[in-house]
Amino acid sequence: MIPTSTLTCPECSHSETETMPVDACQFFYDCKGCGTLLRPKSGDCCVFCSYGTQPCPPIQEARANGTAGACRSC
């Protein structure tokens, strides 16, 4: 499992590498570049799945177990 993901803001393109919560989805993230409050895109469980270079750990685990798209934390 990859514990970090680089989030890229869709408003200002600022990128920041963050450590993801291991056992939960993160629904909100304040961009450190412009202050925009990021929320997951429709159909995604968290901001890392929408704007990150890596999906959240629960999704990584689900994919590794062959249950892609299923997030047990949401």
Image (spheres, rainbow, N blue to C red):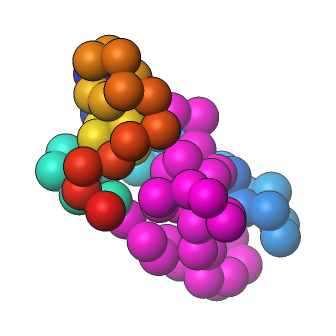
Q: Nearer the viewer, residue 60 or 8?
A: 60
Q: Residue furthest left?
A: 23
In the rendered image, residue 4, in percent from the top left (x then y), is placed at 37, 36
Q: In the picture, residue 74 is in which quadrant?
A: bottom left
User: Which residue sits at x=53%, y=77%?
Assistant: 30
Q: Which residues are magenta?
A: 26-55
In this image, 57 relative to 43: left or right? left
Q: Residue at x 47, y 76 (%)?
A: 28
State whether residue 74 appears in this view. Answer: yes
Residue 32 visible somewhere in the drawing = no
Residue 66, percent across and down?
35, 17
Q: Position of residue 3 (x, y in %)?
A: 29, 33
Residue at the image point whose x is 30% and y is 38% from the top: 57
Q: How many marks?
A: 0
| Quarter of the image that includes the N terminus | top left
Front-most of residues 48 and 35: 48
Is 7 left or right of 60, judged from the image as shown?
right
The main secondary structure of the magenta stretch is loop
The residue located at (67%, 82%) in the rendering is 36
Q: Quadrant of residue 24?
A: bottom left
Residue 38 drawn in magenta: yes
As drawn, 61 above or below 52? above
Q: Is residue 25 magenta?
A: no
Left or right: where does residue 61 sit relative to residue 16?
left
